[in-house]
């Protein structure tokens, strides 16, 4: 489905119990990674629907069926797209699940639109762009611009995302995901915005808390503030440079 936002459109789908049903039915919002679309959550959707919950999946600007727009994108602007869609659909609050940049959008959503977030699940989500983002993304963006597509980086992306074991057991699904990456539109100005998004993302400005800023790095302050916004517990899933951290509201 398409939602009109100004002169552009956001692609989304909404699954599960009708809005004519009980008001207590909760909505789980899924947000995808760069070079992906909402289809990346296909394996998770049936399990969530089986719990009697609604599922809202959104394609980020310039991804999937959503239009791009001029200028660089901030996390707050990407979060505002989700809020506008929630308003249009009459959804007051969501349980939010995001991967990579999808999780970073969730961080901005929780800080700037706190009442709209019931809980957060942040997967492989850093609090800001990596310090060596230029070295990581520069060659990839150059290859994309030269080819006019993501085809040159599709295989390397798949190697980072999925294991050989997954590919052997799920060859059709592996191919679907690869095709989505390769077909992502990054021509011309859009590739420049994609590059800026990858290299310049930073957490929204926060007031320093006396004492804490001397003890913790910025990312720890960022997560500390998120925990103060939504009562939650944290589970460390793995230890990586951008450690996947899971948050869930205490109820």
Image: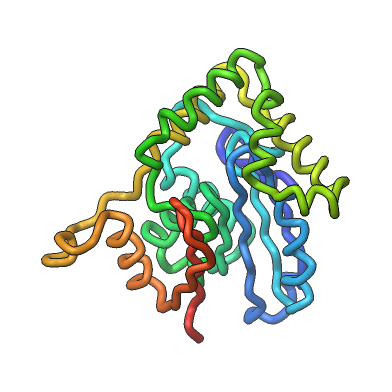
199 left or right of 162 in image: left
For residue 170, above or below residue 92:
above
Q: Residue furthest bottom?
A: 251
68 left or right of 130 in image: right
Nearest to the observer: residue 250 or residue 90: 250
132 left or right of 246 in image: left
Residue 174 placed where, x, y %? 80, 45
Residue 40 placed where, x, y %? 71, 51
For residue 77, above or below residue 120:
above
Residue 86 placed where, x, y %? 58, 58
| Count of number-bearing discs | 0
Q: Residue at x 72, y 71 (%)?
A: 48
Q: Residue furthest right?
A: 172
State the colouring used for the structure image: rainbow
Q: Residue at x 18, y 66 (%)?
A: 212
Residue 225 falls in which quadrant of the image? bottom left
Q: Residue at x 77, y 53 (%)?
A: 165
- Asked if residue 70 can be seen in this view, the reply is yes
For residue 193, above or below residue 175:
above
- Asked if residue 92 can be seen in this view, the reply is no
76 left or right of 24 in image: left
Q: Residue at x 52, y 23 (%)?
A: 139
Nearest to the observer: residue 150 or residue 114: 150
Nearest to the observer: residue 92 or residue 209: 209
Residue 2 placed where, x, y %? 71, 44
Residue 229 falls in which quadrant of the image? bottom left
Q: Residue furthest top?
A: 146
């Amino acid at each position: 489905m398409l939602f009109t936002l100004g002169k552009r459109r956001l692609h989304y789908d909404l699954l599960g119990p009708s809005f004519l049903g009980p008001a207590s039915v909760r909505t789980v919002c899924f947000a995808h990674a760069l070079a992906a679309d909402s289809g990346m959550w296909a394996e998770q959707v049936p399990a969530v629907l089986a719990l009697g919950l609604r599922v809202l999946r959104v394609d980020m600007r310039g991804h999937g069926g959503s239009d791009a727009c001029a200028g660089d994108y901030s996390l707050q602007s990407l979060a505002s797209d989700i809020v506008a869609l929630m308003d249009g659909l009459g959804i007051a609050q969501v349980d939010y699940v995001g991967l990579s940049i999808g999780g970073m959008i969730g961080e901005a959503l929780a800080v700037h639109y706190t009442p709209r977030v019931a809980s957060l699940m942040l997967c492989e989500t850093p609090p800001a762009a990596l310090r060596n983002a230029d070295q990581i993304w520069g060659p990839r963006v150059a290859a994309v611009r030269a080819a006019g597509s993501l085809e040159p980086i599709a295989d390397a992306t798949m190697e980072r995302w999925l294991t050989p074991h997954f590919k052997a057991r799920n060859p059709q699904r592996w191919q679907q995901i690869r095709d989505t990456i390769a077909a992502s539109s990054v021509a011309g100005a859009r590739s420049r915005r994609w590059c800026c998004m990858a290299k310049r993302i930073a957490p929204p400005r926060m007031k320093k808390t006396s004492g804490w800023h001397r003890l913790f790095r910025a990312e720890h302050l960022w997560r500390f503030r998120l925990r103060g916004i939504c009562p939650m517990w944290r589970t460390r899933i793995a230890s990586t440079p951008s450690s996947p951290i899971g948050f869930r509201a205490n109820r």
